[in-house]
């Protein structure tokens, strides 16, 4: 049974999609063992409490340095013997120290088709604002392994979503979540938990 540690910053709808998929059997061989938020007010923590899952806030504001914050994060992941770290709307940069502790054992959901609209500065609604400002007709979401860069790791799954003329960033964000994120994040976890994902030469191979 793969032990998942889910890192969140906000509403936690992707966390909810994972919890629902575990309950319905769309994710097998995995359980959510720990939820960590950098933000004490994150509704995602409530969602974890309602499911009886250990949940905690680790905020950079509570530590004297960024390094101390990173050490606290890694300590909790290791203390709970987490096998796969899932960044589900975690809007904090992951330092090399933590990336190196979880080689190809940390995944991220990003709300665009990488390599478009990703990297530093592209997170949350800003991604969808960028899409609308550029006028692209198709966007989507990507699940990828986390490496030392920002949104540069091996791509596991992607799903496209059409942009509509009357979209606002909020409308587009919701459609990308519903049609892409809440589907491909649980699917990627299930594939990894069942040993179907391999990384070779920086690229992902999936056996179905
Ligand atoms: C999601 O859209 C996720 O893709 C995005 O933050 C949102 C979190 O929503 N993540 C990033 O932008 C990471 N670069 P949620 O808390 O409701 O799951």
Image (spheres, rainbow, N blue to C red):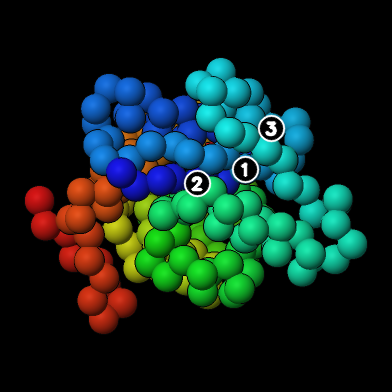
Give the side of residue 81 with respect to residue 90, left or right. left
- Residue at the extreme bottom: 201
Task: Report which residue position mark 2 lands on.
Answer: 5
Q: Residue at x 34, y 47 (%)?
A: 2
Give the side of residue 91 with respect to residue 198, left or right. right
Residue at mark 1: C-beta within 8 A of ligand 1: no
**SS of the residue at dot 3?**
loop
Q: Position of residue 100 (x, y in %)?
A: 51, 74
Q: Residue at x 27, y 35 (%)?
A: 27
Task: Report which residue position mark 3 lands on.
Answer: 42
Of discs 2 and 3, which sits in the foreground?
A: 2
Q: Position of residue 101 (x, y in %)?
A: 51, 70
Residue at mark 2: C-beta within 8 A of ligand 1: no
- Residue at the extreme right: 64
- Whether residue 167 is visible here, answered yes or no, is no
Label 2 vs 3, first from the N-terminus: 2
**SS of the residue at dot 2?**
strand
Label 1 vs 2, first from the N-terminus: 2
């Amino acid at each position: 049974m793969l032990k998942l540690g889910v890192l969140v910053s906000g509403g936690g709808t992707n966390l909810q999609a994972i919890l629902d998929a575990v309950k319905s059997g769309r994710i097998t061989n995995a359980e959510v063992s720990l939820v960590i938020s950098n933000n004490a007010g994150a509704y995602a923590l409530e969602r974890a409490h309602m499911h009886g899952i250990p949940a905690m806030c680790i905020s950079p504001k509570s530590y004297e340095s960024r390094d101390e914050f990173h050490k606290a994060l890694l300590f909790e992941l290791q203390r709970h013997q987490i096998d796969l770290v899932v960044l589900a709307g975690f809007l904090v940069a992951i330092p090399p120290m933590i990336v190196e502790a979880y080689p190809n054992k940390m995944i991220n959901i990003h709300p665009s088709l990488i390599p478009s609209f990703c990297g530093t500065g592209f997170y949350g609604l800003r991604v969808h604002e960028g899409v609308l400002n550029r006028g692209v007709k198709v966007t989507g979401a990507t699940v990828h392994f986390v490496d030392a860069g920002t949104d540069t790791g091996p791509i596991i799954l992607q799903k496209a979503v059409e942009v509509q003329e009357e979209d606002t960033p909020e409308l587009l964000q919701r459609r990308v979540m519903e049609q892409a994120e809440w589907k491909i994040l649980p699917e990627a976890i299930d594939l990894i938990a069942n040993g179907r994902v391999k990384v070779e030469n920086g690229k992902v191979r999936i056996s179905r």
